[in-house]
Image (tube, helix red, strand yellow):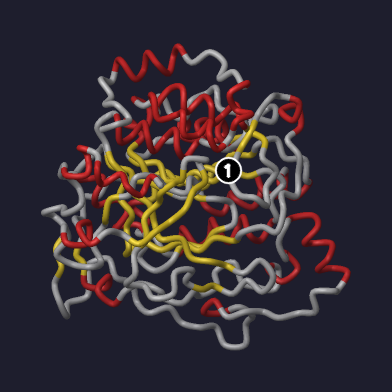
Amino acid sequence: LAENYAEGEGANEELPGVADPGTVFKEGELGNFEPKEEQQRSGEHGEMGEPVNVDLDLPEVRRAMNEFGFNTYVSEMISLNRSVPDVRMEECKYWHYPEDLPTASVVIVFHNEGWSPLMRTVHSVLLRSPPYLIKEIILVDDFSDKGHLKDRLDKYIKQFNGKVKVVRNSEREGLIRTRSIGAEHASGDVVIFLDAHCEVNINWLPPLLAPIRHNRKVMTVPVIDGIDMHTWAYRRVYGSADRHFRGIFEWGLLYKETEITKEEARRRKYNSQPFRSPTHAGGLFAIEKKWFEELGYYDPGLQIWGGEQYELSFKIWQCGGGILFVPCSHVGHVYRSHMPYGFGKLSGKPVISTLYSLIRRNFLQNMVRVIKTWMDGYGKYYYIREPSAKHRSPGDISAQVALRERLHCKSFKW
């Protein structure tokens, strides 16, 4: 397992940003960005993240699940501004962050998304973020064809007076390229990527931005909570908030998580401080706009989705940056039952992915591309797990190899 990364030279190097001198813990004194306690709206569905239970055999529910991959029938019953439970560690309430944090552009990519999950994502960001830190929310439409995502969306966002913008692809580009398009349009100091079916939690933003203020080459990742696809219940995924897990991978490039090592835990004075992680799940994270640009955004040769989290993780670490998981930043996410749409013109392209056994193992070309560019001789272990990948061409990776040389990136062994 790649969890043995601690044997590499990089494991013993300090990563600036973990302990920002401008971020101060004051026991018993609520932090400067701590909001008032959220109030539950009496009699409304789903308040404080409580489940909304309906008969799952209802025709409306079956239709919603088939069309969107989760129960939008229930989602439509719930306020776009619903309250959520504060699932953070108690320690998180007493951190004081610098007032001059970098501004954020929140990029949300979508394709044929349900109305209420998408809008609840937007509303939650505006509801639970200091207004001066949100430069904009950019909704990037990857060539949707559903009516509610056209004129209705354009009219709806006018109420936000330019704070929420829509960028539309003229053809299907896939998740990876569409994220890069969103980042290119961003005008904030930091780009934060969210999926189109999320709800941010209490005081989620300052903890993500503070490490980047101290070290611009750090990517920060929130703790991802679960929102039930059937009932829309909001719950912690990891049980106790004080247990911390980092992103790892096995040689088949399957993403996994394991508890942080004792050595990593000892690096921090407080259990609520950020900690280093070799990789990340891929969906939700913050990165400085200029640093992302210097890294070439995502490799434009990656198709649709799959492997992009490894490409970016390896690139960040090997080229002088690092990844921090942030225990005091929580974001809820709905996991679909299935992929409810196709990929249009992209479907015929030779793409692959080896994510989970429940997802068809295609997208091999993406993985081979990442291996050839970043993993040096360690790619042989992937081929042991995926022998058929030996026959896949990565395509032209000369631009990515040149990028690695230009940035003086370290070896994978490091």
In which quadrant of the rendered view does residue 38 lie? Answer: bottom left
Image point (50%, 63%), residue name: 332
Image point (76%, 79%), residue name: 54
Query: Residue 42 versus residue 311: which sits nearer the camera?
Result: 311
Q: Position of residue 398 (x, y in %)?
A: 45, 11
Q: Is residue 364 left or right of residue 243?
A: right
Of all residues, the one furthest to the left in this rendering is 21
Residue 274, placed above or below residue 376:
below
| SS under mark 1 | strand
Residue 363, placed above or below residue 4:
above
Q: Position of residue 14 (x, y in %)?
A: 15, 44
Q: Would you name the residue on which mark 1 appears?
A: 109
Q: Position of residue 220 (x, y in %)?
A: 33, 49
Residue 163 appears in the figure: no
Q: Quadrant of the C terminus?
A: top left
Amino acid type of the residue that numbered disc 1 sits on in the rendered structure: Val
Residue 197 appears in the figure: yes
Q: Count every numbered label the image shows and give the total.
A: 1
Q: Is residue 121 left or right of residue 16?
A: right
Query: Residue 330 versus residue 150: which sits nearer the camera?
Result: 330
In which quadrant of the rendered view does residue 274 lie? Answer: bottom left
In which quadrant of the rendered view does residue 411 lie? Answer: top left
